[in-house]
């Protein structure tokens, strides 16, 4: 069985981790999301799971459209970001996006290698 990892898995969890670790930014670049997803897929694959990372421009824009009450796309200095909308909290993200995580996937989201991809931790 394959474990597909897509924007719905990555965006909210990346923002939760950034805010949990004291980052004041409420945005994450598309490159950081790609790096985060790659680290998660690598960990799951090393654990014997068939993990497939599904990231495309179209899926990114569809995700932001589908969850417009939470996120917007913004560009700063030529870099595209997904930004958390004003008034949306970390608890809102947890309630909506973290309610059905498996233990292995939750572990993959918070491993030091995954957090390094978000520039959190000593290796960043």
Image: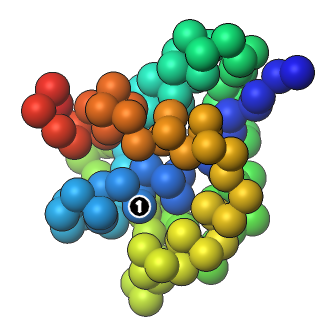
Of the pair 8 and 73, the residue shown nearer to us? 8
Spot occupied by residue 39 in the image (x, y as percentages of width and height): 45, 23
Establish if 37 lies above or below 118: above
Q: Secondary structure at mark 1?
A: helix
Spot occupied by residue 49 in the image (x, y as percentages of width and height): 71, 17
Of the pair 75 and 89, the residue shown nearer to us? 89
* Chosen colour scheme: rainbow
- Answer with left or right where residue 119 lies relative to residue 68: left
Establish if 96 lies above or below 45: below
Spot occupied by residue 8 in the image (x, y as percentages of width and height): 66, 51
> Can I make out residue 100 in this image?
yes
Q: Which residue is mark 1?
A: 16
Q: How many numbered markers are drawn?
A: 1
Residue at left 43%, top 89%?
87
- Answer with left or right where residue 32 lies relative to residue 109: left
Of the pair 67 and 106, the residue shown nearer to us? 106
Establish if 107 lies above or below 74: above
Residue at left 74%, top 15%?
50
Few, some or many C-alpha atoms within 10 Å of disc 1 (few <14, some 14-19, many ≥20)? many
Of the pair 70 and 51, the residue shown nearer to us? 51
């Amino acid at each position: 069985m394959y474990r597909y990892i897509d924007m719905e898995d990555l965006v909210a969890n990346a923002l939760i981790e950034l805010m949990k670790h004291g980052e004041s930014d409420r945005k994450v670049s598309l490159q950081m999301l790609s790096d985060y997803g790659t680290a998660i897929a690598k960990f799951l694959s090393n654990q014997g799971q068939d993990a497939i990372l599904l990231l495309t421009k179209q899926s990114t824009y569809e995700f932001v459209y589908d969850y417009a009450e939470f996120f917007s796309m913004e560009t700063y200095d030529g870099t595209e970001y997904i930004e958390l909308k004003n008034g949306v909290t970390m608890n809102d993200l947890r309630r909506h996006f973290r309610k059905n995580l498996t233990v292995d996937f939750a572990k993959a989201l918070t491993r030091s290698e995954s957090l390094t991809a978000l520039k959190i931790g000593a290796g960043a």
